[in-house]
Image (spheres, rainbow, N blue to C red):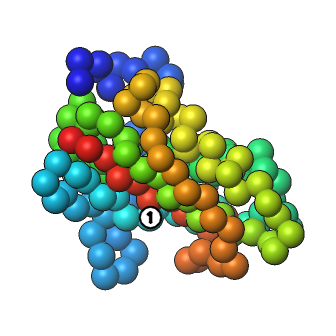
Amino acid sequence: MTTDISARLKTLGIDLPPPSPPAAAYVMAITTGNTVFLSGHIAKKEGKPWIGKLGKDMDTDTGKAAARAIAIDLLASLQNHLGSLDKVKRIVKVMGLVNSTDQYTEQHLVVNGCSELLFEVFGEAGKHARSAFGVAQIPLGACVEIELIAEI
């Protein structure tokens, strides 16, 4: 990839945080062949789990902001794992889990917060396949969890 991703992040006003450590018995990233799999990252606000349930005490726009925050954390983990985001050829797949009520049906709009940022950062290479699910609960009560697969 000829794009300087760190320059693009700077243009977008994004400073990547330190990568999060795993919260249980797993690793945050693993490479097999030319594919990197990132473990699910939960939404955080001010360094703590961003707690909430869509359709109960959180609206779609707030959930979308949480998903965008996760995208930034995913990029931090990816950069930590690869040494440089310029090694990413394409974002292949994003899977989003949205802590939501049975009646809530805008999970896809919530996960757009992540997808849209990946498009902004990587351009065409940021366009990816995606799934978005509503779930009854996410670890630590977080509102959203997202995992990512990238080609290097």
Residue at mark 1: 40
- In the picture, the quarter occupied by the N terminus is top left
Taking the spot 36% from the left edge, 80% from the top edge, the residue there is 24
Q: Single out the residue that lies furthest toward the front.
A: 129
Q: Nearer the viewer, residue 34 or 49?
A: 34
Taking the spot 55% from the left edge, 57% from the top edge, the residue there is 131
Taking the spot 42% from the left edge, 50% from the top edge, the residue there is 93
Taking the spot 26% from the left edge, 44% from the top edge, the residue there is 151
Q: Nearer the viewer, residue 132 or 116?
A: 132
Residue 39 in percent (x, y) is at: 37, 64
Residue 52 in percent (x, y) is at: 73, 66
- In the picture, the quarter occupied by the C terminus is top left
Residue 19 visible? The answer is no
Q: Quick check: 84 left or right of 26?
A: left
Residue 107 found in image quarter: bottom right
Residue 116 in percent (x, y) is at: 57, 35
Q: Which type of secondary structure does the marked residue at label 1 adopt?
A: strand
10 Å crowding of disc 1: few (<14), some (14-19), many (20+): many
Amino acid type indicated by mark 1: Gly
Q: Quick check: 44 left or right of 34?
A: right
Residue 149 in percent (x, y) is at: 35, 53
Residue 142 visible? The answer is yes
